[in-house]
Image: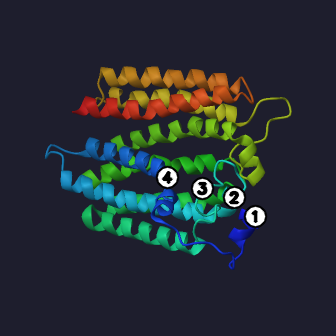
Amino acid sequence: MSAPSAIASPTAAIPHGRAGDYLALTKPRIVLMVLVTTLAGFYLGTTGGGFDAALAINLMIGTALSAGGTLALNQYFERDTDAMMDRTRNRPLPAMKMRPTEALVFGAVATAAGLCWLLISANWLCAAVTAAITIVYLAIYTPLKRYTWMCNIAGAIPGALPPVAGWAAARGAAATEPFILFAIMFLWQLPHTFAVARMFRADFERAGIHILPKDAEGGGNPSNLVVIGACIGLIAAGAMPALLGYGGLPYLLTAIVLGAAMLSYGVAMVRAPGNQPAARRLLLASLVYLPAVLLALVLSRS
């Protein structure tokens, strides 16, 4: 029996999941990125009273639970398409390492537990922002992937909200600064996502996932303008903390230099359709940009 057939069949002989399978459901690398960006927002939102280590730990626990649970639910909903792609077919559900109902219950319980933890240990605003991440990711981004490449715009929203949740945990109120962090995260994700889409284009097309639009008849791809526009916008958004007085010169130089590097790699990628090395270089540049810029911003506020 094929993986897709087994997933669709309630009578398929699928073993109970092990600890490693449950961990894989949470996509640990993505959770780690969520934790880092949430903690950065929390640190930047900390006022003169000093860094509250106990609150930070509770924030990390609640965020890890809700993020891991949300990603597990995502794998539950996408188990059929995951089985069709080389890059995802070894995940616990398409590989038939656990039952779908186990993933559903695990994801729902972890998500609810994380939101309750944040509501009790942090504040309602932090819990509300985190709940919005779950709702947009599962109810909008996940189903849209089957219909339109514009899902990437919707998907960038929950990906950009973690630092806002961290700020909300520290301050209990909204402000301009976390939404600048939101803008940086939002714009950063677009070239990052389209680089991944080009690298695994055949996989996504096989599964009917519309991450990348079809090439135009006259050449080029509609996503090209999004990639270049987002890279240019990222340079501008990255400069805003320094221009508003809460990011120093070292931060400004880091943001501009790395933003310019992403723009140059973005231009190279859109000028070389089907060139996977060009897409890989943009992906690597994006993976350098985010931690370096966040670290520079945190150090400038120390």
Lower position in the chain sequence, tag 3 or tag 1:
1
Q: Tell me the residue that label 4 is attached to.
A: 158
Identified by mark 2, the residue type is Ala
Asked if 243 appears above or below 134 in the picture, the reply is above
- Quadrant of residue 270 in the image? top right
Q: Residue at x 44, y 34 (%)?
A: 290
Element class at badge 4: helix
- Classify mark 3: helix, strand or loop: helix
Within 10 angstroms of label 4, few (less than 14), some, or many (20 or more) residues?
Answer: many
Q: Which callout, 4 or 2, points at the residue further toward the start of the chain? A: 2
Q: CA distance from mark 3 to mark 2?
A: 19 Å
Residue 36 percent across, percent down from the top left: 37, 44
Q: Are marks 4 and 3 in contact (CB under 8 Å)?
A: yes
The residue pinned by badge 2 equals: 83
Residue 172: which quarter of the image?
bottom left
Give the mark nearer the N terminus: 4 vs 3.
3
Quadrant showing the C terminus: top left
Callout 2: few (<14), some (14-19), or many (20+) C-alpha neighbours within 10 Å?
many
Picture coordinates of residue 133, whole percent (x, y):
47, 57
Evaluate whether residue 174 shows in this view. Answer: no
Q: Are marks 3 and 2 in contact (CB under 8 Å)?
A: no
Residue 23: horizontal and vertical position, in percent? 46, 59
Query: Which circle, 3 or 1, is nearer the viewer?
Result: 1
Residue beneath label 1, please?
2
Q: Nearer the viewer, mark 1 or mark 4?
A: 1
Dot 3 amino acid type:
Tyr
Query: What is the CA distance from the residue labelled 3 to the residue labelled 1?
Result: 27 Å
Q: Mark 1 and mark 4: span between their CA atoms?
A: 33 Å
- Type of amino acid at the residue the image marks with label 1: Ser
Q: Is residue 67 above or below residue 32?
A: below
Please report contact status of discs 1 and 2: CB closer than 8 Å, yes or no: yes
The secondary element bearing badge 2 is classed as loop
